[in-house]
Amino acid sequence: MNVYETDRIRNVALVGHQGAGKTMLAEAMLRASGAIQRMGSIVEGTTVSDYHPSEKERQMSVFASLLQVEWEGVKINVLDTPGYPDFVGEVSAALHVADAAIFVINAAEGVQVGTELAWRTALEAGKPSMFVINHLDKADTSFRAVVEQIRERFGRAASIVQIPAGEGTREIVDVLSMKQATFDPDTGRLSEKAIDEAHRQEAESLHNELIESIAENDETLMDLYFEKGSLTEDEMRKGLHEEMIHRQLFPIFVTSATQNIGVSRLMGFIRNVLPNPAEMPETKLEKGGTLKCKASGEPVAFVFRTMAEAHVGDYSFVRVMSGTLSPGDDLVNTHSGASERLGQLFSIIGHERTNVTRLVAGDIGALVKLRNTHTNDTLLRKGSSSSVAPIRFPDPRYATAVVASREGEEDKLAQGLHQLANEDPSLIITHDQHLSQLVLSGQGEMHLEIARFRLKNRFGVDIEFVKPRVAYRETVQQQARSKYRHKKQTGGAGQFADIAMLVEPLNGEFVAPADISVRGEHSEKLAWGSTIQFIDAIVGGVIDMRRFFGAIQKGVMEALQKGPIAGYPVGDIRVVIFDGGMHSVDSNEAAFKTAARMCFRSAFREANPILLEPILNVEVLVPDAFTGDVMGDMNTRRARIQGIDAEGPFQKVVAQVPEAEMHRYSTSLRSMTQGRGLHRATFSHYDSMPRHVQEKVVSEAEKEKEEE
C-alpha cells in the first residue's frame, strides 16, 4: 500500500447505537473504493471488520476495527466501532485518535442511547461530527422525523446536506451541490443529473438554509453572501470545513449502506471537507502542553489498542501524533521506560495487513511484537517528554466475582486477566482480601462474557462467574464499656493483662465522662477506608502504655478485621482505654494483645452494633416511554429517588441505591427498556440498613461460616 503524507489522510470513526448499520457502511465504503469486489454479510459472518470469532458468533461488533480506504488519492482510515453499550471503551479509544466522528443513525429507530453515549464522548474530545441517516430504503422510516430528533437533542447546528429523492428509489438530492444522484447497485458509484421538479422547491429552500448556516459563523463568507446573494459550492465547502473543525455545524447525510446508496458521495465529502490531521487542534499532552501534528517533528506514536492475533502475536494499533515512524527506529515507552525497537510497520484492513515503509504524522497503523507496551502508552525518542494524554475509559457498570473452574489454575487466571486488562483498560480487576474474592468489572454482562471467551480460547482457563460479595461494614450506635482480664498460668511465667475499654461511634469530638481523663489520642485510617481513634485515658500507671499500647492497638486491630456481627470489617469507631492492671512478671505484649481483642469484642456487642451497606449514586438514562418501568423497578431495589431531569428525548432518573440491590442491573435495565436504557453508578456513602435486611445478611454469613 502507498505511503500517504499528512495532508492526504483523513481519520474518521463510525459511531452510533447497535443496529444503525456502521459495519455495513464500512463494507460499502470498501466496495465503492474497489478494495473488495463483493460486499460481505453480517449474518454470514463475511464482513471485513467483524472478523473475530466472538463477533461472528454474536453477529455484532465487539471490537473497533481499522479499515483503510483509498478515495481519489486520499487515504481514509475508518474506525468501525461497536454500538452495544458494553463496548463503549472501544468507542472512547477510537474517538481519541480519530479526527472526526460520523454518527450513523437507523432511520427506523432515530436517536438512541448509544448515539447519546457516543455524542458525549465526541463532545468531550472536541471532535468534528456529522450525521448519516441510514436504512432509508426500509419501510416505516421518516427522514424528517429523525432530523427533528437530531436537532432536538444535538442542536440546530445540525444542517441538512442531503434528502432522499422519494421512497423506494436509489436517488438522493444533494442540496450542497444542487444535484440529484443515482447510485450503481453493484459498485455504489454515482451519476448526477438535474434535480427533479418534485424536489426542486424543497432543495432550493434547504440550499439557502445551508448557505445561511455556513455564512453566519464566518464574516468573510457572510460578506460574500450579502454581496452576491449566494455562495459557490467551493465557498460552502470551505465554510463547512472550518465550522466542522470548531464544532459549529454538523452536516446530515443520507445512505442505505446495504444497497450502497449515498456511500460514494459521503466519501467524497470526507475527502473534500473533513480536516486532515494537521488542520486539527494540537494534541494535548499528559503533563500539560500540546503537540503539533507534522511529519518533520520528533516521532511520537500513541498506542490506542492492543490485541493478540493468532500466529502473529500482539498487535499494537498506533496513531502517529508527530514525526515519521520507520522500521528499526528505537523508541522509549514513557510509562514503563522500556526501549522498543520497531520492526515491521503495517497498514490494516480488518484482519488483513500490508507492509508499509513508513507511517507519517496523522496516520494510523499497527506495530507487532512490542515487548512492554500496552494501550494508552506513548512511544517517542529518548529524552523527549511529549507523552500523549491517555484515553479516558468509562467507569465500570457491572461486576462479578470470578473463580477458576479447575483447582490449581489461580495463577494462570490472574495472568490472563492481567493481560486482558492491559489490552482493554475498561476491564477492571480488583482483589478484596477482606471478602476473599477476585472481582472483574466492566460495562455489562456481555463485556464480561467476551472476557471469559477470550480467557478460555487464548489462555486455556475456564472460569465461573459468581455473585460478588458486598463490602458491608460493622459499627456501633451507642457507647458501651467492658472489662476483660486475661490470666493464664502454665507452670513457668504466666500471662496476665487486665483492661477496661469504652467503645462508641466516631462522630464528633470525644466528650469524656467524669471518671475518664484523656492523656493522648491516635487516629488511624484503615485499609478498607474507615477510621479508628484510640484514646489513652490510663491514669496512675495501672497499665504501662509506653510498653503495651502497641500490643493493645494490635489486638483491637485484629478484632476490627472481622466484626462480631457477621465477620465484616469494623470502622468509624472510637476506643478509649481507661483502666486496667498488670503484673510485674506475667504481663507481656501477647497477654495485652489478647485482652484488648476480647475486651473490644465484648464492648462492641453491648454498643448496639449494626451493619452498614454501601450506597451508590445511580443515574439512569432512558427514553420517556420507559420512565415508569424504571421508577417502579427502582422502588423494588430500596432506592431513594433524588429526581428526574429531561435530557433531550431522554429522561434521566437520579437515585441512591444500595449496592446489594444493583447486581446485574445493567442486564435488567436492557430487558425492561428494549436495550435503550443506560446507567452509571458511583460510590456515595455507607448507611444503615433495615433490620430485616441485616438479619438476612447475618444469617447468610453464619451459614457460610458453618460450611467452611
Image: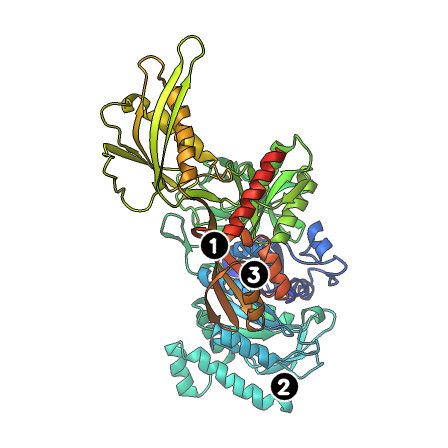
Q: Can residue 277 be seen in this view?
A: yes
Label of residue 464 in the image: none
Circle nearer the viewer, 1 or 3: 3
Report the front residue among 659 and 378. Answer: 659
Crowding near the residue tagged with mark 1, few <14, some 14–19, many ≥20 C-alpha atoms within 10 Å: many
Label 3 belongs to which residue?
Answer: 636
Query: How far apart are labels 2 and 3 at the CA level?
Result: 61 Å
Q: Name the residue under label 2.
A: 194
Q: Which of 54 and 289 is in front in this view?
A: 54
* Image location of residue 480, percent across then percent down: 36, 39
Residue 510 located left or right of residue 381? left
Location of residue 579 with respect to 310 vertically, above or below: above
Q: What residue type is labelled 2?
A: Ala
- At label 1, which amino acid type do we have? Leu
Residue carrying label 1: 616
Which quarter of the figure has residue 624?
Answer: bottom right
* Of pointers 2 and 1, the one earlier in the residue sequence: 2
